[in-house]
Amino acid sequence: MTRILKSVGAVLAALAVCVPSVVAQDKISPVSDYQFKKDYAQFENIKKEPDVQKRAELLIAFMKERPISKALSYVATEYMEAVKPHIQSKNWAKVIAMEEAFIALMPTEKRVADEAVPEPGAGEFLKGVLAPTMKSMQSGLMAAYYQSGNFPKAAEIGERLNAAAPSKEMSVTLADIYLRMQNFDKYLEFGNKVLADYPLDQSYGTALQMAQVYLQKQDAVKARELYVKVMEVYGDKVPPGVQEAAWNQTRAVAYSLMASNAYAQKDYPKAVELYTKVTTYMPKVDEAWFYIGMSKWRAQDPEGAIEAFVRCEVIGKTNAAKATGYLEQLWKARHNNTLDGLDAVRAKAKAELGIN
């Protein structure tokens, strides 16, 4: 009996030594290769579910059961496939709800650190799986909010993504979002980044939109600077894919703004040169003809002033009355204080401008 008790005691002692080792082995790292194989096998079974909605629910259940897993990127990709039909049908409320539900279960860096360290694969998991997967999911959610018209929420996510990993593509996206929100200060902030990241032959549209914003903010200097830069690239040609008629209007606005500055600086030859470009692209801009007339008059060219004023007059818009006053004053001074012959000049100007 004593011998039996000693044997039992020996066995118990041995078990006491072994138990800690067994317990230690029970704690399997969630980012270990062993666990990955198990997780991936479970994921493969879920993929076989033919019902899309049911498959999405099983993937969510997997996330709850295995909050940290190297299979996460596979799970996320498959989940987005389940979301895709709702994207195609533009059911943005459903898309947002599904993506929000998945993102809420995404592991945090702290949770990975708490549960996986000192497992060597934890760092690789964070770098190779968690960060890009989270970025992809957040980008999808931002797009859904954008498409739904919730631009403030799209901007919030975009700012967060950009803070983590700035990119020129995100600058373009955020500039567009803030323009739609009419948050012009933020639009200009990201618009300037776009201009810094892309050559002007690609970013001229942003430059022109920024110029319009500056004009609304009554900052003609910055607006003019942008128009000058764009005209240096596309002043004598039309950008690819742009209708010439539409681009002529843009050129007319640009050269008109530049010309008004030259006129204000009393650089009358330059003003004539630039306003003449305006009339080349938009012949019936009465303001251009009016200031060509004023510039030539001040430059001691009365004949040239008459020719410009008569065109401004026959166009018949805002500056017509002033143009008529200056036109008749100059004409009388050169025709014995009469208006004889002026009607013929007016008729000629109408014919040249295609005015009935």
Image: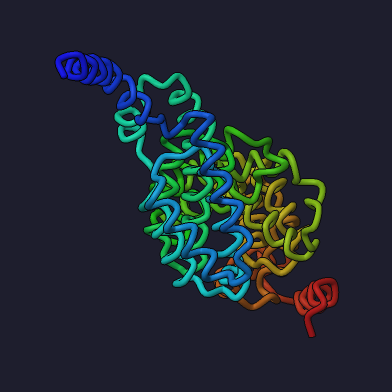
Q: Position of residue 326 (x, y in %)?
A: 60, 65
> Can residue 218 be seen in this snapshot?
no
Residue shown at 67%/55% (left/top)? 292
Q: Is residue 233 left or right of residue 90?
A: right
Residue shown at 75%/75% (left/top)? 342
| Depth order, front residue of 156/334 | 156
Q: Position of residue 112 (x, y in %)?
A: 36, 32
Q: Is residue 348 left or right of residue 13?
A: right
| Depth order, front residue of 257/121 | 121
In the rendered image, the vertical position of residue 33 relative to residue 142, given as above or below: above
Tag count in the figure?
A: 0
As drawn, the residue found furthest toward the left would be 2
Q: Quadrant of the N terminus?
A: top left
In the rendered image, the vertical position of residue 128 relative to residue 159, given as above or below: above
> Can residue 97 be seen in this snapshot?
yes
| Depth order, front residue of 149/340 | 149
Q: How is the image coloured?
A: rainbow
Q: Position of residue 54 (x, y in %)?
A: 52, 69
Residue shown at 23%/14% (left/top)? 10
The image quarter containing residue 37 is top right
Q: Position of residue 25 (x, y in %)?
A: 37, 25
As drawn, the residue found furthest toward the bottom would be 356
Q: Quadrant of the C terminus?
A: bottom right
Q: Is residue 182 left or right of residue 74?
A: left
Q: Is residue 192 left or right of residue 110?
A: right
